[in-house]
Structures are given as structure tokens and as C-alpha cells.
Image (tube, helix red, strand yellow):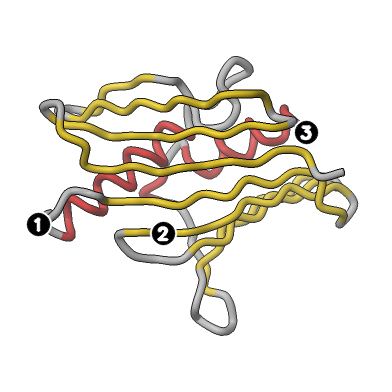
Amino acid sequence: MKEFLIEANRFLFSCPEKLVIKNLSQNDMKFIEYHRDNYSYRNYFTDGRFVCGQIIISLNDIPIWCMQFQGGVVKDGLDERTARHLKLIARKNRGLCDEKYPLRGPRENLFSDYHYHNDVFGCLKKFQGQEVIQKDGEIYFSMKLLGGELK
């Protein structure tokens, strides 16, 4: 499962500006999906500056792992272009996932003037954490996450 999560994150988020985001039929949520063999990755989320969502990985159509997330742009007064750029930074970091950091990518990264940082505690079986994007020491973006294996 870990290898599939890394593969899905790399495939979907290595070039996030080309990511295909679909609408659910009720138009109240968006989703992103990736499939290989008997595995599926589905990311369901609301749209906007503040988002709530859930990623589910299934094997043979049975959910085996899940992550919930909530957060987004927290800096007041940001224009829409900057808000979209912050989401893009978070997605780009996910595209850098590897064996050491399979969930959200490297713990720290720099994207021009923005400092990306994530603190994830636990392992894939059970974890919680937060990712933050700062500029000049001020928080612009914050996302809380938790999840693990489904038994």
C-alpha cells in the first residue's frame, strides 16, 4: 500500500498545474483519482480557500486506508491568485513523496519566497499532523490531517 500511495502522489502531483480535477455529480465536491491493478486512490474535497476532504485507498474495491484533511488559506486579504499558488505549493510537495515521506512529501521545502513545512506524527497505520506554508515568518496556509489503516 505504501508503494501505491507514493506512486499515486508522484503521478498526480508532480505536475499539479496539469492535474485533472473532476466534479461529483451533485457538484458539491471535487475529486481526483488514480488506479493501478487492483488499487484505487480517490481524493474527495470541497473547493475554495478553506477545504475539507478525504483520501481513500482501496484494494479490490475494499477501503484499506484513509486520510481526512481540513484547512487552507489562513492569511486574510490574500488575492485569489496567491491563494491558488499556495494550494499549488502544497500539491507540488506531495509530488515529491518518497519512502521516507510517503504522506505529504519532504518535511521542509522552499518555493521561491514561501517556506513549506509539515509535521506528521505516527506512521501510515495511524498518524496525525499539519502542513504549513509561511512567508517572512507569517503563516499563509495551514492544513490539518489525520488517518491510517482501516481494519
Nearer-N-terminus badge (1/2): 2
Point out the image quarter for the C terminus: top right
Return the mark for residue 1.
Answer: 3
Q: Residue at x 46, y 66 (%)?
A: 46
Question: What residue did someone put label 1 on?
Answer: 77
Quick one: label 3, few (<14), some, or many (20+) residues within 10 Å?
some
For residue 44, side relative to residue 136 (left or right): right
Up/down of 16 relative to 77, above or below: above
Point out the image quarter for the N terminus: top right
Tell me the kind of residue under disc 3: Met
Q: Residue at x 28, y 43 (%)?
A: 141
Question: What residue did someone put label 2 on?
Answer: 51
The spot of residue 3 in percent (x, y) is 72, 28
Foreground of the two, 16 or 130: 130
How far apart marks 1 and 2 lie (CA) works out to: 17 Å
Q: Secondary structure at mark 2?
A: strand
Tell me the kind of residue under disc 2: Val
The spot of residue 91 in percent (x, y) is 41, 41
Tell me the kind of residue under disc 1: Gly
Q: Of tags 1 and 3, which is closer to the observer?
A: 1
Quick one: label 1, few (<14), some, or many (20+) residues within 10 Å?
few
Foreground of the two, 122 or 40: 122
Nearer-N-terminus badge (1/3): 3
For residue 67, side relative to residue 85 (left or right): right
Quadrant of residue 50 within the rendered picture? bottom left
